[in-house]
Amino acid sequence: MKSEPDVFGIDDLKRVTVEPWDGVRNYQARNMMRDQMQVGDQVFFYHSNCDVPGIVGIAEIVTQGYPDDTAVNPEAKYFDPKSDPANPRWYRVDVKFIRKLSRTISLHELREQTILENMPLVRKGCRLSIMPVTTDEWQAILTRE
């Protein structure tokens, strides 16, 4: 799961412990939250749009996907006037801080690992805020910490 550290970073998640992952306005990412993420799944927390983009921590999914009510709130930052509460367009999950990594595993470093060559994160043009990680990719990344 990707976020900009100056908007909401791993230290923010550590401070609040649990946070709704709202504001996702991409259908593919929405589908992953709604249909694939399960309570107890662990996720990498990735910082983007910063000096050294990379994986900085681990979080855990603590709720099943549920409608993102910011989409129907005209006062909310992520309001979507086409969203309908009776037929939700956007979903979110709640995430819980698990731990910070001992260091940032940079995007540059991730791209150098051949085992990760098919991972969406390292491919050009694949920058969703939520991306799947296989078990082999997860293990390979953690060995770099």
Image (tube, rainbow, N blue to C red):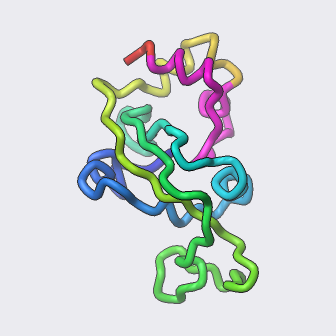
Viewer-proximal residue among 58 and 10: 58
Residue 5 part of the magenta-drawn span: no
- In this rendering, the count of numbered labels is 0
Viewer-proximal residue among 122 and 31: 31
Q: Who's the residue at 53% across and 58% down the image? A: 63
Q: Position of residue 101 (x, y in %)?
A: 33, 29
40 relative position to 145: left or right: right
48 relative position to 64: left or right: left
Residue 124 part of the magenta-drawn span: yes
Q: Residue furthest front?
A: 40
Q: Is residue 93 above or below residue 11?
A: below
Q: Is residue 12 above or below residue 100?
A: below
Image quarter where the C terminus lies is top left
7 relative position to 93: left or right: left
Q: Position of residue 122 (x, y in %)?
A: 61, 28
Q: Position of residue 72 (x, y in %)?
A: 59, 84
Q: Who's the residue at 47% across and 18% down the image? A: 109
Q: Who's the residue at 46% across and 44% down the image? A: 60
Where residue 114 sits, quadrant-wise, is top right
Viewer-proximal residue among 98 and 80: 98
Viewer-proximal residue among 92 and 53: 92
Q: Position of residue 140 (x, y in %)?
A: 53, 15
Q: Residue furthest bottom?
A: 74
Q: Who's the residue at 49% across and 20% down the image? A: 141
Q: Is residue 60 above or below residue 94?
A: above
The stretch in magenta equals 119-142
